Image: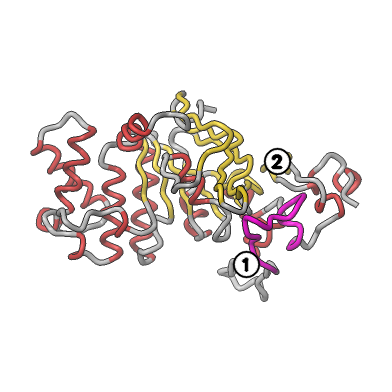
Amino acid sequence: MSKPLLDVRHLRVEFPTRRGTLLALDDVSFDIAPGEILGVVGESGAGKSLTGAAIIGLLEPPGRIAGGEIHFDGQRIDNLPPERMRAIRGRHIGAIFQDPLTSLNPLYSIGRQLTETILAHLPVSAAEARRRAITLLLETGIPAAEQRIDQYPHQFSGGMRQRVVIALALAAEPKLIVADEPTTALDVSIQAQIIALLKRLTRDHGAAVMLITHDMGVIAEACDRVAVMYAGRVAEIGPVGAVIHRPAHPYSEGLMGSIPAMDGSRERLLQIDGTMPRLNAIPPGCAFNPRCPQVRDRCRHQRPELLPAGATLAACWLHAQGGEQGGLA
């Protein structure tokens, strides 16, 4: 195993409010190796995008990192001053956001935005920066890039704007890309192009990708490992094939059971009753216990850590030593 490029340990994110402090991320730990794509999946409100924002130093106030450490390429980055973090974020960590309109300046042509990014981080001439910008646009699936490079964001469709955002994220040849729903605005054929592009980036440049998505098809196609999040914690993490085909956590099992089978072998899709708890109403013990079909008394009082569960790690007492004899009943 190569040394992790990104190492997140016991990350805790809080939001102070007048009614108390809300715990949004609680003891989140994972790592990503160079050349690896880690998928992060879960319902809305699970903490996926918040984890990505904490890693790249873009937490919205009053959110704050209240505990844990984030190490990138051997350096701790969660405690860096904003100026130093900004330099790392632009040069070594790329970000792809869900809404391209929040990432592009409507007053500048896309060519200007791309070339300024390249010139700020790479030792190249203006002419070379423009050539690289055109190449990036072509790689991300924008036709007639030589003509379109001087157009403005409003002259592009939503899917085209998302491809421009991806080109921006790749502009400085980063070692890590945090991609938050990068294929949401794209049709299926363009999704395949973007997935292929991310996979080629990891293969050719050894870059690591944290891929945040709701789409299990994207996870299955693109990722090496997957982390399933629930209520601000990692419920299960492991190789993508194991989590999809042999989920060890009841929440993961529910997520995978809600995916239609292409061969028609699944007559009825599974349904997870209830909803994700609010931050001010996370239950004691395992946060999933009110919705879990296999809940036991221990689940309502004790919070499980990630435990070995075959090929994966799962935060579930079902996998405590001795299984049912481990104090579940």
Pick the quarter of the image with the N terminus.
top right
Q: Is residue 64 above or below residue 156?
A: above
Which range is magenta?
274-291
Q: Label for residue 306? A: 2
Where on the picture, by quarter, is residue 119?
top left
Q: What residue does disc 1 label?
A: 258
Where on the picture, by quarter, is residue 9?
top right
Residue that protrudes farthest toward the front in the picture? 18
Q: Residues within 10 Å of mark 1 (few under 14, many from 20)?
A: some
Q: Secondary structure at mark 1?
A: loop
Q: Would residue 142 appear left or right of 316 to someone viewing this image?
A: left
Q: Is residue 141 above or below residue 83?
A: below
For this rendering, which residue is in front, 62 or 74?
A: 62
Q: Amino acid at mark 2?
A: Leu
Q: Would residue 246 appear left or right of 79 to someone viewing this image?
A: right
Q: Secondary structure at mark 2?
A: loop
Q: Amino acid at mark 1?
A: Ser
Magenta region, main secondary structure: loop
Q: Is residue 197 above or below residue 184?
A: above
**Magenta highlight on residue 80:** no
CB of mark 1 within 8 Å of CB of mark 2?
no
| Mark 1 or mark 2, whichever is nearer to me | 2
Q: Residues within 10 Å of mark 2 (few under 14, many from 20)?
A: many
Q: Please tell me which residue is depicted at 20% across the width and 60% down the height of the picture.
A: 153
Residue 175 drawn at (x, y percent)? 37, 34
Where on the picture, by quarter, is residue 148?
bottom left
Q: Please tell me which residue is depicted at 68% across the width and 67% down the height of the picture.
A: 272
Q: CA distance from mark 1 to mark 2?
A: 24 Å
- Decide which of tag 1 and tag 2 comes sooner along the chain: 1
**Magenta highlight on residue 276:** yes
